[in-house]
Image (cartoon, rainbow, N blue to C red):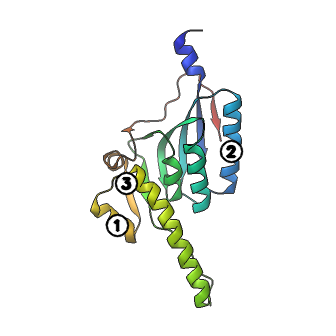
Amino acid sequence: MSEDQAKHSKEAWFTLSGDVNSDMVHRVFEAVGHMTEDGIETAHVLVQSNGGYVSDGLCLYNFMSKSPIEFVMYNGGAVASIAVIMYLAGTRRYASETARFMVHKSHATASPGSRPDALNIIVEGLRADDARTESILRKHVELTPEQWAIHQYSDLHLNSRDAKTAGMINDVADFTPPKGAVLRNI
């Protein structure tokens, strides 16, 4: 086997789509277990997700960023909300020309007739989630003061060029598995 073939045998190509939730966490845990058994060193992952639960996204970020597998992340369409935090676990990150990202503060809906103490608990939880996600965002991304201001009160949308300028992605590039590569869905 040539050196080039050996290098490629340690790489694998995956797709990951859907809501960020406990099911996705389980699927990623299981996939990484198989990757380590198979001797995979680099996993190229195309992500398509509009977000989901903050704690599950944080778990995936922490797990993937500390995994023995190097994750190379791709956005071919939309990576939004907490899925952006998971996506930032990639050591290298790319987005297609037509891809978009969206980040925002946490939100919740209180039950009608909620008492003030219950509302305070919800608010405290949202503030804690925002602090956790914003610390990761600031670690990886350099937004302009105007972008941070939008993020403070609204959804901040970034196209692939904006994401590159902010350091969210390394470059504008498509997910392109090499011919003959096995593509697996996580």
From the image, tell me which residue sits under label 2. Answer: 29
Quadrant occupied by the N terminus: top right
Inter-mark Cα distance, 1 to 3: 11 Å
Total label count?
A: 3
Q: Is residue 47 above or below residue 54?
A: above
Amino acid tagged 1:
Ile
Looking at the image, the residue that sits furthest to the top is: 1
Amino acid tagged 2:
Phe
Give SS at disc 2: helix
Crowd class of label 2 (few under 14; some 14 to 19; many from 20; radius 10 Å) = some
Q: Is residue 99 above or below residue 82?
A: above
Residue 96 appears in view: yes
Amino acid tagged 3:
Leu
Inter-mark Cα distance, 2 to 1: 34 Å
Task: Name the residue nearer the viewer: 139 or 152.
Answer: 139
Residue 37 — which label? none
